[in-house]
Image: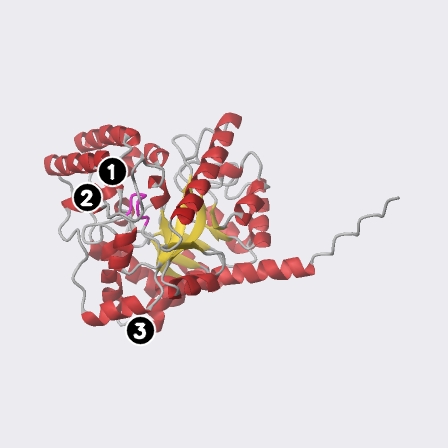
Amino acid sequence: MDDKHRLAPSLLALGLAAALAWPGAHAAEVGAQARQLHQRILTLDTHLDTPANFARPGWSLLDDHRAEGEYSQVDYPRMVEGGLDGGFWVIYTGQGDRSAAANLKARDQALGRLVEIREMLARHPQQFELALTPQDARRIVDAGRKVVFISMENASPLAADPSLLSFFHAQGVRMLGITHIGNNEFGDSSNPRQGEGAEWHGLSPAGRALVAEANRLGILLDQSHSSDAVFDQLIELSAVPFVLSHSSADAIHENPRNIDDARLRRLAAHGGVIQVNAFGAYLVETPANPERRAALDALWDRSEKAASPAQLRELAARRREIDRRFPVPQATFEDYMQHLLHILQVAGPKHVGIGADWDGGGGVDGLSEISQIPRITERLLQAGYDEQQIADIWGGNVLRILGQAQAHAARLAAQAPAPAAAASGH
């Protein structure tokens, strides 16, 4: 996670906002009808970067961390308060320089983050449970626990040995993002590093093989962060629908990370789903402020060394001071809803969901942390969407295409020739 923002300091400066600096940092007032509907349906977010906090000394997912502002947006008390049933918890690795040493480092970081997620599950079995199938999600929620699907953001950990995907799948990974900021061995990024440009013009040969292997295993492919050319090739190559786990609308705010309307329609025709992002810099144009950016970069350098909740609270207070000294317009809840409602209109409610990028830079004024998500349900009701459509948006759509990916993998496994019997010896 630290590397995530180090790779894009300008996005950090423009896109993040301190939750405590915004009005309504606690759960927003929501009408009774919306609140009751929100509690009835299964609500999943497809991009929770919260595992980045799991290894901090003294930091527990069972504690309320809202005093840590942008440094902690998701925890168990606020999941209960906001009615979030769970989602896809991210194994994130920043894109290294693609040397052999960097690829091995990425592999080891991903394995470490996987262990941290599994350790969290082992520590809190009454509150959280690993989900492997769509059916698991409903069962886990009915049992009173929160759903933990595991996803991988950036396939760089597989560069040294792509066969490791089978191991990660066996350990619970059910979603795979191909790139992050910067091209990698598998494909081009929507945000290549300075001087890179398009390297593969979409997927590399290794990337095409990775798509086939993910299809074989039943892992849901995630196009977010990858180039438009990767999107086009996934439409052609993937035997099953894919997801954009946290992306927004290019028609509302032009940005390489966002998706244009023509591709939204192609995604829907292919059966895929886009989960709408709440990263402010992807929602609105924010004016550059060099002094603010320098102050935020310096603060982020300090945050990389922060360990305890107390240190994070101190950083949150310093962040609020930067916001006071160097104010800039911030994306709002209405900006987020403009993207969501536009995408719903273009792609249709069977092909849209929520992936706000919590604890990874997501959050806007009025939707700054997880307790406030019932506001989305209320606005969807006000826009005329019915209960089934809202249930699809909040979890049904992504579970449907995960089920399709797993059903395809099961058919492939059933068609595979049986292994030859071992020769008998004497």
- Disc 3, SS: loop
- Residue at numbered disc 3: 386
Residue 241 x %, y %: 50, 59
- Disc 1, SS: helix
Residue 155 lies in magenta, yes or no?
no
Residue 64 x %, y %: 24, 48
Going by the numbered disc 3, the residue's amino acid type is: Asp
The answer to which of 358 and 223 lies nearer the viewer is 358
Count neighbours of disc 1 (C-alpha within 10 A) and say few if under 14, some if 14 to 19, many if 20 or more: many
- Residue at numbered disc 2: 67
Disc with the residue nearer the chain's start (2 vs 1): 2
- Secondary structure mostly seen in magenta is loop
Please count the marks in the image.
Answer: 3
- Disc 2, SS: helix
Query: Is residue 135 visible in this depiction of the protein?
Result: yes
Query: Is residue 226 visible in this depiction of the protein?
Result: no
Which image quadrant: the N terminus? top left
Residue 191 x %, y %: 39, 39
With respect to residue 166, does 261 lie above or below?
Answer: below
Labelled disc at residue 309: 1
Residue 360 lies in magenta, yes or no?
yes
Labelled disc at residue 153: none
With respect to residue 332, does 383 lie above or below?
Answer: below
Q: Which residues are magenta?
A: 357-362
Residue shown at 70%/57% (left/top)? 416
Going by the numbered disc 1, the residue's amino acid type is: Pro
Q: CA distance from mark 3 to mark 1?
A: 41 Å
Left or right: where does residue 232 sit relative to residue 318? right
Going by the numbered disc 2, the residue's amino acid type is: Ala
